[in-house]
Image (spheres, rainbow, N blue to C red):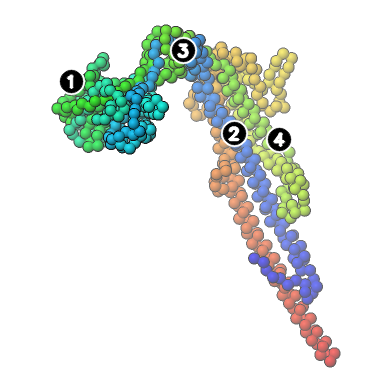
Amino acid sequence: MSTLRVTGLASGMDYESMIKQIMDAQRVPLDKLNQKKQINQWKQDDYRAINNKVLDFKNAAFDMKLQSAYLTKTASSSNTNVATVTGTGTAIEGSYTLQVEQLAKTATLKSGTLTGATIGKDTTITVNGVDVEVKSADTYQDLANKINAQSVKTGVKVAYDSTLKTMFFSSTKTGAAADIDLRGADVTSILGLATNGTATTTTGNVKLAADTSLASLAGKSISLTIDGQAAPFKFDITSTTTVGDLMSKMNDSLKNTGVSVSLNKDGNLIIDNPVKSKAIDFTTGSDTTVLDALGLTGATGKDTASVYQTGQNAKVKFNGVEGEYDSNTFTIAGLSITAKSEGTDVTNIGVTQDVDSVFNKIKSFVDKYNDLISSINSELSEEKYRDYAPLTDAQKKEMTDDQIKQWEDKAKSGMLANDSVLTSSLYSMRQALSSSISGLASGQLKNLSDIGISSSLISGTSVSGSYLDKGKLYIDETKLKQMISEKPDEVMALFTADDKDSKTTAGDGVATRLYNQASAIFSQIVDKAGTSTSVKNTYVLGKESLEYDKQISALQTRLDDMETRYYNQFTQMETYISQMNSRSSSLASLLGS
């Protein structure tokens, strides 16, 4: 809000300039406070920039203290037409053979030739237990769209080709558990299919819920015997078993048979068998009290004509041992294998240590360490220009942008020169690197220098590294790769060892030590300078900034009051002079008359 001030009209004095000069002198303490606050902000910025690098290094150290970083394997297949293979950390080095006797396949089904523009009648088609409502005016493409809309529930998708006038059904998964089960009074006539089986649905007569407890049946069991299965499926009940738990166990075990267990909308237990010819017996071997509780005593099945098709599992021989998998991509002995073709051909699989991968991880870790200590050393040794204080607003008005930048570059320099937090941090990391690791077997690798990593490197007549590098690490790449190849477990232990003793780091590996050190350094700097999301009163420099704000506010208020007082005093004096001049003019006028 501007104030109308009368200055010098009567006296001819430049009160505005006089008061400005007085206030400029009075504002010197305020300028110094603002400069201190600015220095505080620059320090905070520099601390946080360093801490970003500390955090980056901490994350790298965490990765390097995990054994998985050193267990990378390279796997190869001699015949990629049979199968491709990749190694995981649990794969064991060696040679293996693989034969793919049968590929995993989806369940597939095609309709007959479909004629007519529309379905022609209202009906319901049940796809894998899910009802799809069909209207007489629906086209076959409409029907396909409705079935596909339920594919998440049914696991079945269909494509309609108007040229071939055929619908092609396919399960969304491969394996023997994948199936297509179509039911309904009109399913065969609408789709031009012949039934290839009869499904039987057994419905219980007791109302249940998924969370109904079966604790009273603890210690008892229910058994299902299915024709064609070598052994019955037995399901034990415990004191914590609910109806939902029992159904989940049953469905998981029965998934390759096509049999499913569920509750209908009335809460009755349903056992659905898509192939009646593979009869189910749930009375033999089951406790009668369990059958009573589930409403299955005396329950009878209802037959329904169905069109049914299943997928098939992949069958392989790995080193002569047979196995079945519901997908063509599976894992055996730590190897991720993708089967490509079936037959009598055999592919030879070789597994070796991935030396280059481990080497690159260690090299990247060392590079991050060097980058961090280089940044810290740079901050500690940066020259501080004490004659260059932060510029005031008044000073900036008298300078060009380039001049301001040049001045502030020097004013910002050396904010963390010889800083105690960074100095101790640097020392602790060097100690972590240079100390031998205790607790390892005699003769085992115990120092980074044992694998070719040190602060100096001699190669022929060339020497790298000196005290001027201030702790920078160098890598003898030939030696490091040799150690990774010949002593992979010892290299891993050198980095990942952890004696779980919080009182000492003597038994910890290099990565474990550096992770702990980086964590401690990060916390120290956060306590000092906070983070971008920190509240100011939770860290040291933030509290100092708040105190500066408080002092600046109080001093600014005092200066505003002082300036107002000076203007009031000069204005009052100006008023008196104006009155005197007016009286003098009146007196002169009277005397002159």
Question: Which one is earlier in the sequence, the residue at label 4 or at label 3?
Answer: 3
Does label 4 or label 1 sit earlier along the sequence?
1
Pointer 3 local density, CA inside 10 Å: few below 14, some 14–19, many at least 20? many
Crowd around label 1: few <14 · some 14–19 · many ≥20 (10 Å): few
Task: Kindly report which numbered mark, 2 or 3, lies closer to the viewer in this rendering.
Answer: 3
User: Which residue is under mark 2?
Assistant: 54
Q: Nearer the viewer, residue 29 or 283?
A: 283
Q: Secondary structure at mark 4?
A: helix
Disc nearer the start of the sequence (4/2): 2
Mark 1 vs 2, N-terminal side: 2
Residue at x 64%, y 56% (from the top left corner)? 552
Numbered badge on residue 381: 4
Quarter of the image for residue 252 reads top left
What kind of residue is marked 2? Val
**First-in-chain label (1 vs 3):** 3
Residue 500 at least partly seen: yes
Point 65% across, 17% down: residue: 476
Tags 4 and 3 in contact by the CB under 8 Å rule? no
Please give the name of the residue rendered at 28% of the width and 35% of the height, measured from the top-left corner. Answer: 121
Residue at mark 1 to residue at mark 2: CA–CA distance: 67 Å
Question: Relative to residue 434, is residue 269 drawn left or right?
Answer: left
Q: Which residue is mark 1?
A: 284
Which residue type does callout 4 highlight? Ser
Mark 3 — residue? 82
